[in-house]
Amino acid sequence: MIDQNILTEVGAVLKKYAKNELLFQEGEIARYYYQVHIGEVKMNNYNDEGKEYIQGIFGSGKSFGEPPLFANFKYPANAEAITDTKVWQLPKDQFLKLLEQHPSIHSKFTSTLALRLYYKAMMVSEISTQEPEHRILRILDYFKNNDQKAITNTSSLYKIKLTRQQLADLTGLRVETVIRTIKKLEQKGELTIKNRKVYR
């Protein structure tokens, strides 16, 4: 998202987080801009029964948790390291100053936030109205269409990096439903399974 050299120049710090470690919790005040250097981070919530709902998964080069920095509200979700992860961390005031000084970066953030709003609107509609097959295909296509490697290599099948559990948590389905639905979709030729990995 933001070039590492620029982040270093403006005082960002590279922090390490162990697998399952929280970067911030729902309800906390937003104080930093976060960008993944290596690893993966998920933003999630839990309902009263303890079921997890994943708001999004962010890999190398992706930023997360920015809206509260702009609108001064508390985090609506947790941020948790999926793997051992290194994340750039930049204080809010320095981040906002950076955007003022670099209009092209500011424009990129506007586009990114618009895409995330589209994703949220799409998933609210999918979860409330659509069948499991449709939900899973939409989420797979979303990740495929937003992966730069997949965009530049359109001739081959896209390997889905999400686990069955993550697909369940992203779509509001049970893991058992996801497993059954993936098998049905394979039988219909909508996706391929090789060595337990899903391709689309």
Image: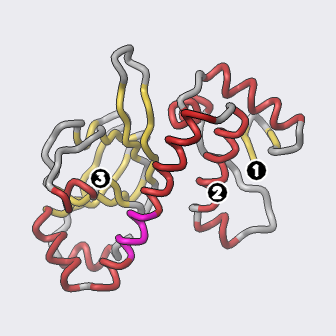
Q: Secondary structure at mark 2?
A: helix
Instruction: Residue 200: give its label.
Output: 1
Name the residue located 44 percent from the left edge and 57 percent from the top edge: 116
Q: Quadrant of residue 4?
A: bottom left
Q: Secondary structure at mark 1?
A: loop
Marks 2 and 1, how far apart at CA: 8 Å
Q: Residues within 10 Å of mark 1 (few under 14, many from 20)?
A: some
Q: Check disc 1 and give the amino acid type.
A: Arg
**From the image, which quarter does the N terminus lie in?**
bottom left
Percent coordinates x, y for residue 179 in the rendering: 71, 26
At label 3, which amino acid type do we have? Gly
**Residue assigned mark 2:** 144
**For the residue marked with disc 2, what is the amino acid?**
Lys
Q: Give the CA distance from mark 1 to mark 3.
A: 29 Å
Question: Is residue 109 a member of the stretch shown in magenta?
Answer: yes
According to the image, label 3 marks what residue?
A: 65
Q: Is residue 89 left or right of residue 1?
A: left
Of marks 2 and 3, which one's residue comes earlier in the chain? Answer: 3
The stretch of residues the image draws in magenta is 108-114
Contact between marks 1 and 3 (CB within 8 A): the answer is no
Label at residue 152: none
**Please, is residue 61 above or below residue 77 in the view?**
below
Quarter of the figure with residue 80: top left
Residue 80 magenta: no
